[in-house]
Image (cartoon, coloured by chain):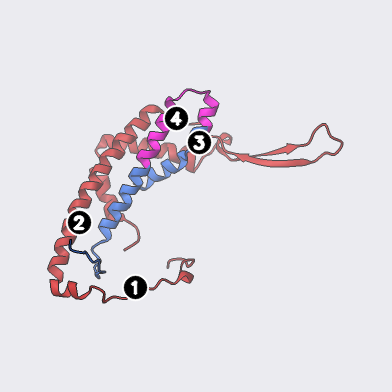
Chain colours: A red, B blue
Amino acid sequence: MNGVRSKTQIELKNVMTPEDEKVHDVAMSIRSKHYAHSINNLEFPHVTAWLAVGTPKREVTSVSTASHMVVPTDETLLHNLSVLAGKLHDWAINEQKTESKRLLSIVKDRFSLDELYAKIGAASPRKIRYSDMAKVRK
Amino acid sequence: MAAAHSIQIALREGKRLVDLFSIQNDLCFVLDAIALLQILQSSKGDPFTKLVMIDSVSTQHLFDTVVVL
């Protein structure tokens, strides 16, 4: 049931108009240039060393780190992104309703009521091995 | 009132519904994050403090989520 949601991703893209895609592209550009693959000195993490002064012993007392973002999100982008996300959210809700109905009809077609009712209390709980959790999926 | 029993059914067709729930969750995160950023941007305060606050509400996570949509 898990894995890449590639088909749904394509559907999501089809819901977007050319204007929506422009908003998405701007957000992606900001993300790629300033957050994911920043290329200037301001956007690298800075390590600061704190030195003792005014005491006989010279030493490093502590270190701290900080990252500086030079491009905060502007109001227009946030508004446009919010409208786009709201539109896609409505689409996802509607698709869920449609998909739930489709799934219900599949269950009704594939199983008789006798088969379904016979399953009540018949299945043993799925065993979970916690030792599997750290394994990498192949 | 009649009781309802849940049973597990072997069906592979449920993946799309799971994907849709996953997308909805991402979109909820985006909408919440944007609402928070808008509040912070409209609030009074010196630019430096606001910049630090905006950074602290995970702007990066917002953009990372946009990528997966």
The stretch in magenta equals: B30-52
Question: Disc 4 marks which residue?
Answer: B40
Mark 3 / mark 4, whichever is N-terminal: 4
State the mark number for residue A100. Answer: 2
Amino acid tagged 2: Ser
Query: Majority secondary structure of the magenta segment?
Result: helix
The local secondary structure at tag 3 comes to helix
Q: Which mark is residue B39?
A: none
How far across and how far down the image is residue A29, in percent?
Answer: 41, 38
> Which of the chains bears the disc numbered 1?
A
Distance between the alpha carbons at the discs numbered 1 and 3: 44 Å
Distance from the alpha carbon under mark 3 to that under mark 2: 39 Å
Which one is in front, A125 or B31? A125
A13 and A65: which one is in front?
A65
Distance of label 4 from label 2 (alpha carbons): 38 Å
Percent across and percent down for residue A111 are 15, 71
Q: Which label sits on residue B55?
A: 3
In this rendering, the answer to whether B13 lies above or below B28 is: below
Q: Which residue is mark 1?
A: A125
Residue positioned 15% across, 70% down in the render: A110
* Mark toward the viewer: 3 or 4: 4
